[in-house]
């Protein structure tokens, strides 16, 4: 009987507080940085890894928010780098900075 009493009291109080929070908050528009846009553009591209079919960049690379103007990623294994260069081709410049790989659109 005590479990029902606490469950009822808990759910009633939280429902009232939750509704007050929803009414008081505002919806804010999310502004995407250049890094976000670049990640959205390349994360679904196919990558040739270990002769497995249907592999994508997002399966082996993780987006890291370091600088808004340049895409920084980390890789799950070092063999991703050559496959990434092939997948992105001449349209992107790939660099290696510390523990991150940087990707920028090519200037030419």
Image (cartoon, rainbow, N blue to C red):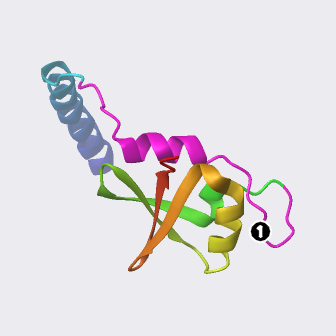
Q: Is residue 33 highlighted in magenta?
A: yes
Residue 18, by quadrant, is: top left
Camera-nearest residue between 21 and 47: 47
Q: As displayed, is residue 17 above or below residue 97?
A: above
Camera-nearest residue between 17 and 87: 87
Image coords of residue 54 (percent x, y): 81, 53
Q: Left or right? Give the position of 55 relative to 89.
A: right
Magenta residues, start to end: 28-53
Q: Left or right? Give the position of 29 relative to 17.
A: right
Residue bearing the label numbered 1 = 49
Report helix, strand or loop for mark 1. loop
Image coords of residue 20 (percent x, y): 14, 23
Residue at the outermost top position: 23
- Which residue is drawn at the image coordinates 64% and 57% (left, top)? 57
How many C-alpha atoms fall within 10 Å of the one at disc 1: few (<14), some, or many (≥20)?
A: some
Image coords of residue 75 (percent x, y): 55, 71
Q: Main secondary structure of the magenta part?
A: loop
Image coords of residue 58 (percent x, y): 60, 56
- Which residue is drawn at the image coordinates 77% and 68% (left, top)? 49
Q: Is residue 46 highlighted in magenta?
A: yes
């Amino acid at each position: 009987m005590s479990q029902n009493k606490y469950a009822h009291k808990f759910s009633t109080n939280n429902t009232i507080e939750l509704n007050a929070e929803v009414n008081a908050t505002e919806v804010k528009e999310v502004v995407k940085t250049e890094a976000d846009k670049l990640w959205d553009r390349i994360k679904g591209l196919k990558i040739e890894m270990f002769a497995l079919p249907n592999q994508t960049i997002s399966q082996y690379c993780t987006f890291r928010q370091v600088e808004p103007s340049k895409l920084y990623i980390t890789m799950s294994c070092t063999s991703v780098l050559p496959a990434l260069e092939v997948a992105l081709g001449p349209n992107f410049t790939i660099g290696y900075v510390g523990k991150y790989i940087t990707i920028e659109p090519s200037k030419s």
